[in-house]
Amino acid sequence: MNIRELTRRTRVTERQVRYLIAEGFIPSPRGGRANADYGEDHVAAIRRYEKLRELGFPPAAIKLLLQARKGAPFTIAPGVTLVIDPNLLGSGARAAPLIERAAKLLTELLKDDKPHADRAANHD
């Protein structure tokens, strides 16, 4: 797709697209300047950037996050931090299956396997 199609699809301006490319938030187009071609990877990168901005990340933090490739940390509760691969942000992936898996994992990790009588004996 050309830049006009990209801007229409993502609802960002051409100027913003050029900024995102210059700053390394999205890849350069294929085909060079005269025949610039953008694809789904560009759409996904713009959506990821926009989602991180919506979540309050400043551009400098987004740049570090994307360069580190370690994921975006979100504190869920004291002692629990969810780290999300930046490629998932704004991807449209379904959250329900992830929530179910996280709930099962947390339930198993936090489960108290000791019977109540054993715990009482250990506290005496």
Image (spheres, rainbow, N blue to C red):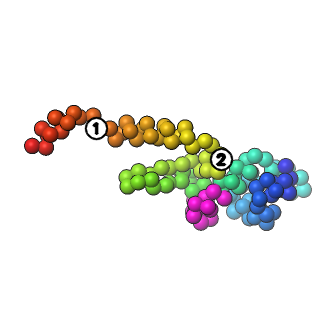
Q: Which residue is drawn at 65% across and 47% down?
A: 91
Circle 2 SS class: loop
Q: Residue at x 57, y 47 (%)?
A: 85
In the rendered structure, are the residues bearing label 1 and label 2 in contact, judged by CB atoms less than 8 Å apart?
no
Q: In which quarter of the image is the C terminus?
A: top left
- Label whose residue precedes the other's in the sequence (1 or 2): 2
Q: Residue at x 54, y 53 (%)?
A: 72
Count of numbered circles on the image: 2
| Mark linked to residue 91 | 2
Task: Tell which residue pokes out farthest to the right in this image.
Answer: 34
Q: In this view, does 65 lie to the left or right of 22?
A: left
Which x, y percent locates residue 5?
A: 84, 53
In this rendering, the answer to whether 1 lies above or below 57 is above
Which x, y percent locates residue 77?
A: 41, 54
Task: Tell which residue pokes out farthest to the left in this image.
Answer: 124
* Residue 57 belongs to the span the image colors magenta: yes
Q: Is residue 69 left or right of residue 10?
A: left
The answer to whether residue 40 is visible is: yes
Task: Give the residue type at disc 2.
Answer: Ser
Q: Is the magenta stretch mostly helix, strand or loop?
A: helix
Q: In which quarter of the image is residue 61?
A: bottom right
Please rate how many residues cluster around mark 2, counting C-alpha atoms within 10 Å: few if below 14, some from 14 to 19, many from 20.
some
Q: Quadrant of residue 63?
A: bottom right
Circle 1 SS class: loop
Q: Which residue is drawn at 74% across and 51% down?
A: 42
In the image, the segment drawn in magenta is 50-64
In the rendered image, which residue does mark 1 sit on? 112
In-front residue for pair 88/18: 88
